[in-house]
Image (cartoon, grey):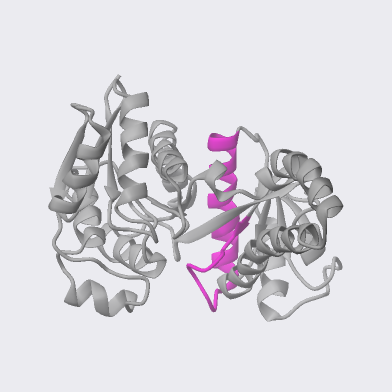
Amino acid sequence: MNKIKVAVDAMGGDFAPLNDVSGAVIAAEEKRDSLEIILVGKEKLISEELNKHKINLGNLSVVNATEVITMNDSPTDSLKTKSDSSISVGINLVKDKKADAFISAGNTGAVMTASILRLGRIKGVGRPTIGSLFPTDKGRTMVFDVGASVDCKPNHLLEFGVMGSIYMKYVYGIDKPKVGLLNVGEEKSKGDNLTLEAYDLLEKSNLNFVGNVEGRDVLRGRADIIVCDGFVGNVILKFAESVLDVMKSKFRTYSEKGFLQKIWVGMMYGTLKNVVLKDFDYQEYGGVPLLGVNGITIIGHGKSSPIAIKNMIYKAEEMIRKEVNSKISEELSV
């Protein structure tokens, strides 16, 4: 079995390089025979973190990058002014076939921009897309797009449905994923020009299109894939991320009201955490792919833990072994 080479942005995220290195070490140790991991970033800082693990892994290496694109940097400008950043160097490794995939918990805009500009788009793809997983009472729903593309055209939403269906089929084993169009009502006549025209394209396609779905349906599992403009999708994503924090805050506030309340919360929180909140935990999913680029890029949350970094690496490996990009190319280049 050929080893998959995954380049990891060791300077990406709120806890870099600590979490990035720790996650890479876990993955390298668990998959010595199938993975080669390349840590990209400031070599001295990375080496200091590696030394803390006191382990010698032959499938783990370091590529130096002297600059860092921060969360506050402009994606486009920083790629021009910081050509030796960990993001630029990592993406170039994929472009030059020295790595099979790149993962980052860093500046999302910079990662997407670098991937699109330097790796290019898969033939037939008008706009790449990034999706996000949402738990439902029936399993999971994936929303495309959640921020890669705004001001989408109807054909872009059709492409999102095609790419999302291929991803869900080969990564999650759903043979004919149900595709829904996010709208303000279920009726075919509802919506603006974008959704009205996109509805016609989706209805005439070979996708398993189930019609319009509303915001309340995202967590109800009416569709395996929901397509929408990236502006709308990003608002949904950010709102969903806030729900978990609010729930935790509510429990914390209630427990501070008295001894009995603290005991009750303590008894309930374990069940809540393991049964309900676990499904909302980004660590379980790692990161999400930027679909439509001519290479594998996995983007993670800025707060990614070592476990999340490890799962991002595994997601990259899975996409490569299941040839997701080849399937997208076959479907859209016709």
Left of 254 or right of it: where is 318?
left
Q: Quadrant of residue 109?
A: bottom left
Determine whether 127 is above or below 317 in the image. Answer: below
Residue 214 visible: no
- Is the N terminus in the top left, top right, bottom left or bottom right quadrant? top left
Residue situated in front as seen by the camera: 4 or 57: 57
Q: Quadrant of residue 258?
A: bottom right
Residue 207 percent across, percent down from the top left: 66, 49
> Residue drawn 65% across and 54% down?
205
Determine whether 272 is above or below 86 in the image. Answer: above
Boundaries of the magenta span: 143-172
Magenta: main secondary structure: helix
Residue situated in front as seen by the camera: 174 or 158: 174
Please check the rendered image and state whether residue 252 is part of the magenta-colored stretch, yes or no. Answer: no
> Residue drawn 37% across and 66% down?
107
Residue 90 percent across, percent down from the top left: 23, 53
> Residue drawn 84% across and 70% down?
185
Residue situated in front as seen by the camera: 54 or 195: 54
> Residue drawn 74% across and 50% down?
223
Furthest-front residue in view?
A: 259
Residue 265 visible: yes
Determine whether 150 is above or below 305 in the image. Answer: below
Residue situated in front as seen by the camera: 299 or 206: 299
Please check the rendered image and state whether residue 156 is part of the magenta-colored stretch, yes or no. Answer: yes
Residue 263 percent across, percent down from the top left: 81, 46
Left of 84 or right of it: where is 289?
right
Residue 151 percent across, percent down from the top left: 54, 79
Left of 161 or right of it: where is 71?
left
Q: How many marks?
A: 0
